């Protein structure tokens, strides 16, 4: 680390030090024509205009490269303006022209890992530069530079006269000073267990100390209380981001007069080390999230994904999918702004904002309500969590619905338009307005927590308003899939204001390499449940693929014939489009008639009509549109067309 040419206090790091700091593998060096000792003192995100200096900066080529020519020109411009390096997206198809251009102009070229996003890269650069900003020149910083957090804990113990623990936001012990015979039992159990006991975290949460800790930059004093000695605590922050805390306990002796100031300096010195710890853990989580999404989507190298997740290729498993019904506006917001559920909840728990939950433990109604309330208390105070950026699992039927009225050939109304209710697709009558954004976020977060706690080894992925759980079946009991679905349904039903949640359990598969097949059927199960409700055929909220197998096959048939009917024309198409545009009375009548097997009296009873009224409507369909319901081909075609208007 250097003392010149940098930002603020004039400090910089070398490209070599940046790559060494990157223990998580966010960046990969492709080329360094000028060597790895070039100075780095900041970053440029995208094109920040001609007035901004690029000197010794790393340029993040986010959204700049629309063509190889534009990419090459951007690299040349960055080098001409003094950039130290350019970071591009990862990929095996990186044009050789980019590498050649970087070599010609002498600028380093790095690739962003496939699982990472630009926020990961920016966080890495800021954290690496924090090393330089921490500086040197005092004993505490110099001692720490040689030995990391363990050395820092020892020197802080000397400065404060207390026993020191340095913890992350999950209250896991990252380093501690030597423990003498006079140490209290809490310190001993914390160090031996590697983290603060759950009962202690809950006690601190109830007392309000954690809230004070997370919201203050000052040293907090906790007086001695019975067998618990006097303690000083301070939060470790990088800007507004919480990284952890330092605790000094007066074990058997008093703290020094300068203990508070020493603890404040220690919090500054600890920043780059905890930032690196968080980056390392974040990188591991992101790699696992990328691998899990790949398995569930059937995208990429399945064997590599399974290996990343530590899943043996012969492990029986299955997928359970829970989906929250929300308004289209809320759905869009949650998909683009939602946080990764597992990461957000683990951080909320670490900050004392929720109940601790072990593997196999269930959330009861009271706990569920407490989780919702606790998660809502700190909403908007984001302690460093960031959006998941995860896309790829859209809502069932998105991009596949028959269409909306008034759009010409192939534009067919959705299920609720066909019924003329004015409700959003899948929204039940009498449920009131769809949940708001905050309620939707909290509901999905708690569902994700419950799924993760169902059993050791469950892998959970949140995508917008969905929670997907990859459940290992080590005992070979496929009923566990339906058991998890039942648990999630029970939890959702007990949560006030949670909205309607439907849960589908896919079939068991012989290997995680086949997980995408189980996920596909779990998704179809949820669509079946929505279709049943749309057609007034029941209000099941969860089911397994085996329980609705015929309906799954019908959905596949409907999906297959959808393009044919969308592009078709003729009497049936004219009838459906015209009638649904004016309320759908005739379509509903024909649907009831077909569902009743052609029995006018049964169909009229279901429609609450006089049989002669139904006969008149059927005759009108024949006379106005030329639809012959006695013809088998016509009956089949109109059955499919009507079902498509009712299928989410």
Image: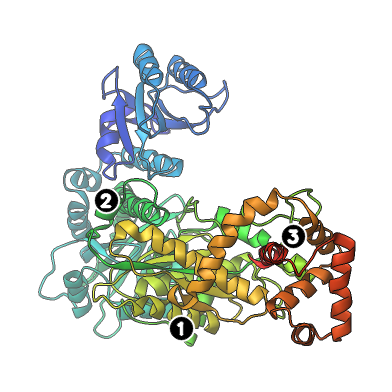
Q: Say which quadrant the C terminus sits in.
A: bottom right
Q: Quadrant of residue 201?
A: bottom left
The location of residue 291, given as percent across then percent down, is: 34, 52
How far apart are the alpha carbons under marks 3 and 2?
A: 42 Å
Between discs 3 and 2, the one toward the N terminus: 2
Q: What separation in Å lies between label 3 and label 1 (alpha carbons)? A: 41 Å
What is the basis of the colouring in this image?
Answer: rainbow
Residue 284: percent from the left, percent from the top? 30, 52
Q: Of the residues tagged 1 and 2, which is closer to the observer?
A: 2
Q: Would residue 113 appear left or right of 226 to someone viewing this image?
A: right
Q: Earlier in the sequence, mark 1 or mark 2?
A: 2
Residue 337 lies, with reference to residue 179, above or below; the image says above
At mark 1, the secondary structure is helix
Q: Nearer the viewer, residue 32 or 64?
A: 64
* Residue of label 2: 303
Q: Which residue matches tag 3?
A: 413
Residues at circles 1 and 2 in contact by the CB criterion of under 8 Å: no
Question: Which residue does the image show at 50% across and 27% down from the upper left?
Answer: 65
Label 1 to label 2, Cα distance in Å? 38 Å
Circle 3 crowding by C-alpha within 10 Å: few under 14, some 14–19, many from 20: many
């Amino acid at each position: 680390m250097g003392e010149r040419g940098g930002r603020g206090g004039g400090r910089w790091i070398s490209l070599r030090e940046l790559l060494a700091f990157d223990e998580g593998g966010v960046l990969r060096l492709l080329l360094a024509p000028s060597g790895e000792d070039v100075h780095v003192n900041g970053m440029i995100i995208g094109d920040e205009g001609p007035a901004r200096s690029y000197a010794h900066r790393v340029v993040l080529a986010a959204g700049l490269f629309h063509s190889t020519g534009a990419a090459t020109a951007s690299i040349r411009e960055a080098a001409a303006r003094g950039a130290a390096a350019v970071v591009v997206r990862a990929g095996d198809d990186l044009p050789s022209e980019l590498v050649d251009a970087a070599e010609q102009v002498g600028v380093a070229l790095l690739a962003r890992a496939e699982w990472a996003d630009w926020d990961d890269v920016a966080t890495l650069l800021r954290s690496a530069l924090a090393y330089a900003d921490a500086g040197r020149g005092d004993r505490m910083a110099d001692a720490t530079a040689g030995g990391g957090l363990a050395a820092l804990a020892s020197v802080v113990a000397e400065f404060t006269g207390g026993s020191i623990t340095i913890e992350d936001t999950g209250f896991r012990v990252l380093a501690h000073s030597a423990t003498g015979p006079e140490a209290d039992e809490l310190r001993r159990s914390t160090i031996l267990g590697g983290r603060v006991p759950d009962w202690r975290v809950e006690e601190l949460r109830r007392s309000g100390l954690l809230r004070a800790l997370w919201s203050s930059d000052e040293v907090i004093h906790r007086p001695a209380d019975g067998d618990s000695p006097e303690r000083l605590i301070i939060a470790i922050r990088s800007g507004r981001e919480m990284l952890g805390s330092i605790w000094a306990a007066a074990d058997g002796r008093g703290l020094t007069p300068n203990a508070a100031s020493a603890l404040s300096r220690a919090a500054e010195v600890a920043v780059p080390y905890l930032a690196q710890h968080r980056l390392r853990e974040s990188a591991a989580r992101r790699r696992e999230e990328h691998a899990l999404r790949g398995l569930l989507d059937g995208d990429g190298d399945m064997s590599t994904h399974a290996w990343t997740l530590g899943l043996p290729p012969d492990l029986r498993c299955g997928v359970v999918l829970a989906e929250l019904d929300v308004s289209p506006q809320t759905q869009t917001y949650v998909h683009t702004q939602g946080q990764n559920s597992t990461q957000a909840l683990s951080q909320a728990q670490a900050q004392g904002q929720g109940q601790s939950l072990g593997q196999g433990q269930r959330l009861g109604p009271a706990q569920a309500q407490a989780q919702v309330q606790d998660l809502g208390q700190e909403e908007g105070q984001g302690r460093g969590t960031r959006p998941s950026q995860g896309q790829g699992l859209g809502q069932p039927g998105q991009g596949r619905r028959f269409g909306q009225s008034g759009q010409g050939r192939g534009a067919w109304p959705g299920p609720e338009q066909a019924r003329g209710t004015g409700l959003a697709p899948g929204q039940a009558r009498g449920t009131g307005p769809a949940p708001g954004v905050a309620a939707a976020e909290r509901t999905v977060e708690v569902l994700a927590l419950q799924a993760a706690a169902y059993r050791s080894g469950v892998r959970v992925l949140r995508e917008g308003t969905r929670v997907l759980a990859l459940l290992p079946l080590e005992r070979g009991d496929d009923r566990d899939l339906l058991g998890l679905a039942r648990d999630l349904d029970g939890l959702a039903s007990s949560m006030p204001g949670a909205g309607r949640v439907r849960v589908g359990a896919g079939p068991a598969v012989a290997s995680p390499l086949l997980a995408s097949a189980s996920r596909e059927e779990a998704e179809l199960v949820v669509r079946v449940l929505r279709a049943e409700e749309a057609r007034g055929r029941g209000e099941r909220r969860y089911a397994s693929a085996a329980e609705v197998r015929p309906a799954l096959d019908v959905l596949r048939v409907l999906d297959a014939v959808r393009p044919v009917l969308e592009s078709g024309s003729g009497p049936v198409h004219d009838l459906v489009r015209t009638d649904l545009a004016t309320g759908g009375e005739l379509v509903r009548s024909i649907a009831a008639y077909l569902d009743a097997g052609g029995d006018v009296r049964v169909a009229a009873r279901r429609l609450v009509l006089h049989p002669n009224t139904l006969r008149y409507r059927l005759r009108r369909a024949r006379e106005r549109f030329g639809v012959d319901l006695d013809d088998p081909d016509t009956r089949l075609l109109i059955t499919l067309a009507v079902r498509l208007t009712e299928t989410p």
